[in-house]
Image: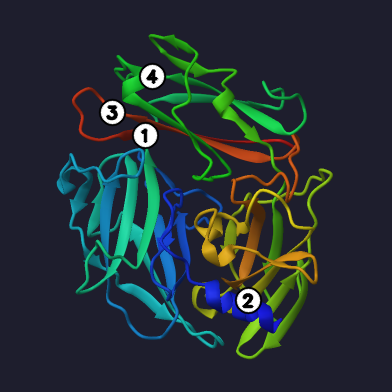
Amino acid sequence: MKRLFWLYLLCVWPAMAIFSQTHQAFSPQIQCVQVTVDGNPLLPPMLDKDKHQHVNISWDEMSHDYHRYIYHVQHCQYDWTPSDGIFESDYLSGLNDQLVENYEKSFNTTQIYTHYQIRFPNPETGLLISGNYKVLIYEDGGSKDEPVLEARFCVYEKAVSIQTEVSSDTDVDFNQKHQQVSLHLNYGSLSVVDPHQQLRTVVMQNRRWDNMVVNPKANIRNNKGIAFTHCRDLIFPAGNEFYKFEILDVNRAAMGVDKMEWFDPYYHATLFAHTPGRNYVYDEDQNGVAVIRSEDDVDDETTAEYVLVHFLLKSERLPGGDIYVCGQWTNGTFDPKCRMEYNELEKCYEAVVMLKQGYYSYQFVQEDGTTGRTMGDFYETENEYATLVYYRAQGARTDRLVGYSRVKTGSK
């Protein structure tokens, strides 16, 4: 236990994140970054431009010291590079670089923290166009070029209609280890002269930006739209159902937890050990989502405890490189603090991660982006596939997000 605790202290703070991450914390004091739509943690951070929806960005700063944070909103192109060709007034109403005013200190917790949150749109800042958005949080007196936190969300239109089909009868195998996505896009009223130049299509599995497919090659084209059928680029490893656990009560073990213990100054939750998947068993999960809550379910943002969670994968050393604990809550697939160490004595991969009380679903992902060796690949697996379609009109200076769809497939 002590060995794992020191391993945690050595690697807990994340380094600069890779491109594929959706959110990034650049300060060792920032924990539990969450981006939710209309207060629903199960939804992806996608806002319908035609609805009165809001995105909420929250995080914990691990002290009771007040930090005067400023937010800066930035519009981005399809690849998340800044939209330098447009003015701030083209995508924002109101003012940018405003003070984060909503904050509250933790109450009666062993690990103290201050919870901050902002909501968009708000009375000071509105969003005018569709596309990708970054929100950069920086200290007053500092610079947006040196943020402590970066959060991402998207605003989409419904200009393009998207029909999605997912099949286990793939061009690689039949009812075995893969799932294949087929797409039909209808331009609607958009003027598309050259779809190869004007459209950018992104397909991802379980909201993972690291293994997303960008611009697969369409094999059907007419004046109404394009289609992707029997596209090798849209064949995904099927994976397996996510593991899950709950730490709602720090005094007793709940779902997925073998034991709860207190070792001053932290609570420790040791999860049940897993072995590499050999057979498929359906288990309803949330595909990597986390929900912050405690047993009392009152003021969870400021009364929930932080717990050191011990993840275990019993196995001989596996080929394919390092193994990471991954979920939406890891804000990217290869967070350094979630990398598992191999224990030769116990023949087990181990990781210790500090997490706020709640429900979590997770996978064991290798550095090659796969889960086949750690969890298995089974065609029956329920997966979520999202398609995003970006459009740049002739002469336009940035990308609009003109279509978005999300489907689930597999066992029900």
Is residue 308 positioned above or below 366 on the image? below
Look at label 2 and name its amino acid: Leu
Which label's residue is closer to the chain start, 4 or 2? 4
Label 3 CA crowd tier, 10 Å (few <14, some 14–19, many 20+):
many
How far across and how far down the image is residue 200, in percent? 38, 29
How far across and how far down the image is residue 284, in percent? 73, 49
Q: Is residue 206 left or right of residue 126?
A: right
According to the picture, the residue beneath numbered tag 1 turns out to be 157
Q: Nearer the viewer, mark 3 or mark 4?
A: 3
Q: Is residue 186 left or right of residue 128?
A: right
Which label's residue is closer to the chain start, 1 or 3? 1
- Determine contact: label 1, label 3, CB under 8 Å: no
- Distance CA(mark 2)–CA(mark 1): 41 Å
According to the picture, the residue beneath numbered tag 2 turns out to be 308
Give the number of the disc on residue 223: none
- Determine contact: label 4, label 1, CB under 8 Å: no
- Marks counted in the figure total 4
- Determine contact: label 3, label 4, CB under 8 Å: no
How far across and how far down the image is residue 344, in percent? 76, 68
- Distance CA(mark 4)–CA(mark 2): 49 Å
Which label's residue is closer to the chain start, 3 or 2? 2
Which label's residue is closer to the chain start, 4 or 1? 1
